[in-house]
Amino acid sequence: MLTASGKRVDADLTVWAAGITAPAVLSTLGLPVSRMGQLIVKPTLQSEADPDIFAFGDCASCPWPEKQGAVPPRAQAAHQQAMFLYGALRARLDGKPLPSFSFKDLGSLVSLGHFSAVGSLMGGLIGGSMFIEGLMARVMYSSLYRMHVMALHGAVGMGLDTVTHWLRSKTSPRVKLH
Ligand SMILES: Cc1cc2nc3c(=O)[nH]c(=O)nc-3n(C[C@H](O)[C@H](O)[C@H](O)COP(=O)(O)OP(=O)(O)OC[C@H]3O[C@@H](n4cnc5c(N)ncnc54)[C@H](O)[C@@H]3O)c2cc1C
């Protein structure tokens, strides 16, 4: 591997952990942004500078008081904020006060290939926190994936996706042929 300064680093395995930044356009809007370039929002998901601008998901930096930081840029946070904002915007249209968003960390799962996964379950799911691994984690990972596909494409789409995945796993070679 070569760094920008031309330094060569020999390695058998390289793990890229550069982190993320929000799209550059957010920093050009004249609104306060975080170190990662996300729009800084209040717990109501309104921009700190303009109450008529809402932001959520990866492009927003929303306070997470329990951790004295910001809500992490993860899929479950974006999903929770989308559901929250749906209700909050309805309340706003009805002239009611805006509620505050509260992130519930349900844990994380990381796939480790075809047969295993690791992760932690937290909060609402089990009332504490628990590390899981192996087949159980893998089954939970697959179930979550299928729930996502079902949310996007419906039950029939999810069923077809599952069958085609299974068929492909039976017919595809384990090594790349070209
Ligand atoms: C490699 C990788 C792995 C990840 N793994 C996990 C994980 O295991 N678990 C987890 O919880 N989170 C994971 N994340 C984070 C997760 O994907 C994000 O937190 C989540 O997708 C944020 O949702 P979002 O709707 O805010 O943004 P996005 O899902 O990024 O959606 C933004 C959308 O806006 C579109 N867009 C961007 N610019 C424009 C434009 N100018 N005009 C029109 N459209 C535009 C994009 O194409 C995209 O469709 C991962 C992220 C990456 C990159």
Image (cartoon, rainbow, N blue to C red):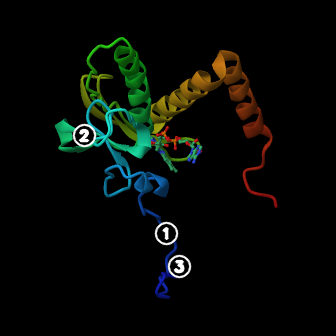
Residue 46 in the image, given as x and y percentages of width and height: 32, 34
Mark 1, residue position: 14
Question: Helix, strand or loop at disc 3?
Answer: loop
Q: Distance between the residues labelled 1 and 2?
A: 33 Å
Mark 3 or mark 1: name the one nearer the start of the chain.
3
Mark 2, residue position: 63
Q: Distance between the residues labelled 3 and 1?
A: 8 Å
Q: Which residue is drawn at 58% across and 27% down?
A: 146
Q: What residue type is labelled 2?
A: Pro
Residue 81 in the image, given as x and y percentages of width and height: 39, 29
User: Marks 3 and 1: CB-CB under 8 Å?
Assistant: yes
Q: Does the residue labelled 3 lie within 8 Å of ligand 1?
A: no
Residue 120 in the image, given as x and y percentages of width and height: 34, 37
Q: How far apart are marks 3 and 2 (CA)?
A: 38 Å
In the rendered image, which quarter is residue 122 located in? top left
Question: Helix, strand or loop at disc 1?
Answer: loop
Q: Which residue is drawn at 42% across and 62% down?
A: 17
User: Marks 1 and 2: CB-CB under 8 Å?
Assistant: no
Q: Which amino acid does label 3 sit on?
A: Met
Q: Residue at x 17, y 44 (%)?
A: 68
Q: Which residue is drawn at 24% across and 40% down?
A: 63
Whether residue 21 appears in this view of the structure is: no
Mark 3 or mark 2: name the one nearer the start of the chain.
3
Question: Helix, strand or loop at disc 2?
Answer: strand
The quarter in which the C terminus is drawn is: bottom right
Mark 3, residue position: 1
| Mark 3 crowd level (few <14, some 14–19, many ≥20, 10 Å Cα) | few
Q: Which of 116 and 127 is in front in this view?
A: 127
